[in-house]
Image (cartoon, grey):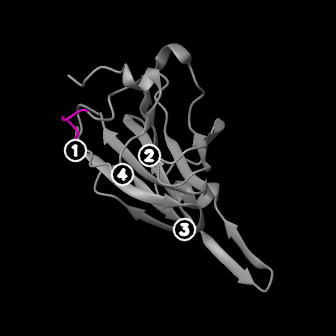
Amino acid sequence: MRFDRAFLEGVCLIYDDSSPDERGTFNRVFSNTEFEANGVPGAFLQMGLSRTRKRGTLRGMHFQHPPRAEGKLIRCIRGHVFDAIIDLRRESKTFKQTFTLELRAESDVALYVPPGFAHGFLTLTDNVEMLYSLTETYVAELADGVRWDDPAFEISWPEPVLLVSQRDRNFKMFT
C-alpha cells in the first residue's frame, strides 16, 4: 500500500496493493501494521455502507462531536463521487479549509479523514455505494453537520445538486 498525505494535517490517500492475473485482481485494502506505521489509526470500531440511487444527490457535510469525534476511512465501491472534507479543528492551521477529490470504484484509493472534519459527497453517477470504516461508534446526539453550500468553505461542486435531505438542508451556516 502507498500512503500519500494531503495538505490538511492527518488527511491521507491510501492506494491499494493490487495483484492482477488472468482472473482479475485481488486488492489488499487494509493492514493494521501498515496503517499505524504511516500514522493512520488501525483500529476501526464500526463500518457503514451508504447506497445512493440518483446522480446529483448530495450527502453531507457530516461529523460527530467529541468525545466521540470519528475518523473515517472512506472508499467508493460502486459508481463515482465528488468527495469533500472540511477541517473544523479550531486549533488547526488549516481551520475551515477544504479538500476535494473524485473517488471511483475502479480507482483503488481510499481517503482517511481524521476526527474533527466534516465529510460529504455528491454522486456523479446513479447507484453509488460508499463504504466507511469508523474509529468511533455512532452516537445520535453527537451527530451534526454544516451546510454543504456555506460560502465560508467555498466548495465548488462540479455538477448541480439535485437532491439533499431535509436534515442536511437544515444544518446551520458555520459561525
Measured in 3D between alpha carbons, the distance from the residue under mark 1 to the one under mark 4, in whole angstroms, is 26 Å
Q: Is the C-beta separation of discs 1 and 3 under 8 Å? A: no
Residue 97 in magenta?
no
Residue on which the image places disc 1: 94
Hey, what amino acid is under mark 1? Thr
Residue on which the image places disc 3: 107
Q: Could you tell me which residue is drawn at 38 percent across and 24 percent down?
A: 169
Give the mark nearest the N terminus, 3 or 2. Answer: 3
For disc 1, the neighbor class at 10 Å (few under 14, some 14 to 19, many from 20) is some
Secondary structure found at label 1: loop
Give the mark nearest the N terminus, 4 or 3. Answer: 3
Measured in 3D between alpha carbons, the distance from the residue under mark 3 to the one under mark 2, in whole angstroms, is 17 Å
Query: What segment is highlighted magenta in the picture?
Result: 150-154
Secondary structure found at label 4: loop
Measured in 3D between alpha carbons, the distance from the residue under mark 4 to the one under mark 3, in whole angstroms, is 20 Å
Q: Could you tell me which residue is drawn at 45 percent across and 21 percent down?
A: 166
Pair 4/2: label in front: 4
Residue on which the image places disc 2: 122
Q: Is the C-beta separation of discs 3 and 2 under 8 Å? A: no
- Classify residue 41 as left or right of residue 169: right
Q: Is the C-beta separation of discs 4 and 2 under 8 Å? A: yes
Pair 1/4: label in front: 4
Secondary structure found at label 3: helix
Seen from the viewer's position, the closer of residues 75 and 163 is: 163
Measured in 3D between alpha carbons, the distance from the residue under mark 1 to the one under mark 3, in whole angstroms, is 27 Å
**Residue 168 bears which disc, if any?**
none
